[in-house]
Image (cartoon, rainbow, N blue to C red):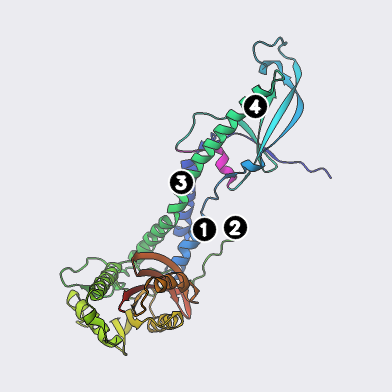
Amino acid sequence: MNLVMKVLMMKIFWERELRDFLEERRNALRHEVYSEDRNRLLNMNETEYVAYLAKRYRVEPLILHWDRLAVSDREEMIPAERFPHDFWVDNGKRYPKQVITYHIPYSGERALLECAPSSRLLWTTDVRLEGGCVCFDVINWRDDAEQVKGEADLILRNIRQQAENVAKDVDQYNSTLEDEARRVVQARKELLLKQANLMASLGVPFYRVEQVPSTFAVPIVAKRIIVKPSAPSTSFSPEPTLDSSVYHEILRIIHETGIEMERHPSIYRGKDEETLRDHFIMVLSPHFQSVTGETFNKTGKTDILIRHENANVFVAECKFWNGIKAFFKAIDQVLGYLTWRDSKAAIVCFIRNKELDPVLKQIETETANHPCFVKYHGKKAEGWFSFEFHLKDDEARGVQLAVLCFHFP
């Protein structure tokens, strides 16, 4: 049985614009989001869906394996018309010449070899894609090794430069893809919710004393083997959610209050969790109020709660640091208080250890081991970590969890 190797001819980095290729990927992402079943989209965990889209529409970088560059040669009958002008040859005839072929192995997205990057050389050459390699030929016209090497080196240098330019454009695309996917998903969900006339019922009626927001935020919900997150296609029911700007304002005030307390040991020394918690409530309460007049209610011993229609949409736990196991129990406790999709939460951690940095490093590196962990969103400030979790029995219900650490030795 004869196997025929497929050969593709092209002018390398010249056939089409790379920006058009990348825009087609973006458009395909948008098309998938806007074609998604409405109820599935609204019920789906947004973080997981965005991660799926970013993985699905990511462009695999083009890699040229220069360390495996190889050459081969063959004799070929060359048309007279291709010979240099100082050769005495007859038009219409062919003459034998040695042809040296350079083979550059490659991996990644093959289509990138056709694409001209935004920053480019005004240059191209004919190549063949054959056997997983980019191949080009240099004809040995004069039995001159230096002539062959000089011509080949120029081509290799230009291919390398163009490949680097392509890599920069692809890296830029890939690095912004997740944010782009998130914007598309949130815009689509907002449109669907408006069409269903649900927007008015999404936000918790909770506002700054000085200013009532005119709108509420859209809720945060969440070849290569790419697993698409599952979600029920049953009718979506709107649930209350704390406006993200209010959530971040609460966290900012907690952070600034804790930093100020660190400067005054007389405030925290000898105090228990409940007393420290009450200090934060005292600072928070003048800044916010709810429509019902019930702002930062207390329940249990260490909780700070915001409630809406008998459900918790924000809960903060104030805890002394007693190791990672106790910290995980605090996370479990917080998640157990929450029922709504896109709930917001915080753990305010009082660290009595002499050394602060080892504790912060442990929180940053080991929180991902919690079974309900979804994603780490990074540090907002020193000692202020932002995570995403899901509820224990419902992976579609995401929870934004901030961990704010204060050194109270």
Quadrant location of the C terminus in the rendered image: bottom left
Q: Residue 97: where, in percent of width, then height?
A: 74, 21
- Point out the frontmost of discs 3 and 2: 2
**In this view, which residue lies farthest toward the front?**
354
The residues bearing labels 1 and 3 have C-alpha atoms spaced at a distance of 16 Å
Foreground label between 2 and 4: 4
Q: Assign a secondary structure to mark 4.
A: helix
Residue behind mark 3: 23
Q: Earlier in the sequence, mark 4 or mark 3?
A: 3
Answer above or below: position of 191 versus 388: above
To which residue does mark 4 refer? 149
Three-letter code for the amino acid on which mark 1 is drawn = Lys
Residue 290 in sight from this viewpoint: no
Callout 4 amino acid: Lys
Which amino acid does the dot numbered 3 rest on? Answer: Glu
Q: Which residue is mark 2?
A: 224
Assess whether mark 1 and mark 2 are in contact (beta carbons under 8 angstroms). Answer: yes
Give the Cα distance between marks 2 and 1.
9 Å
The residue at the point 53 percent across, 50 percent down is 59
- Residue 118 lies in quadrant: top left
Left or right relative to 251: residue 165: right
Q: Which residue is mark 1?
A: 55
Q: Give the residues in magenta.
A: 109-118
Image quarter of the N terminus:
top right
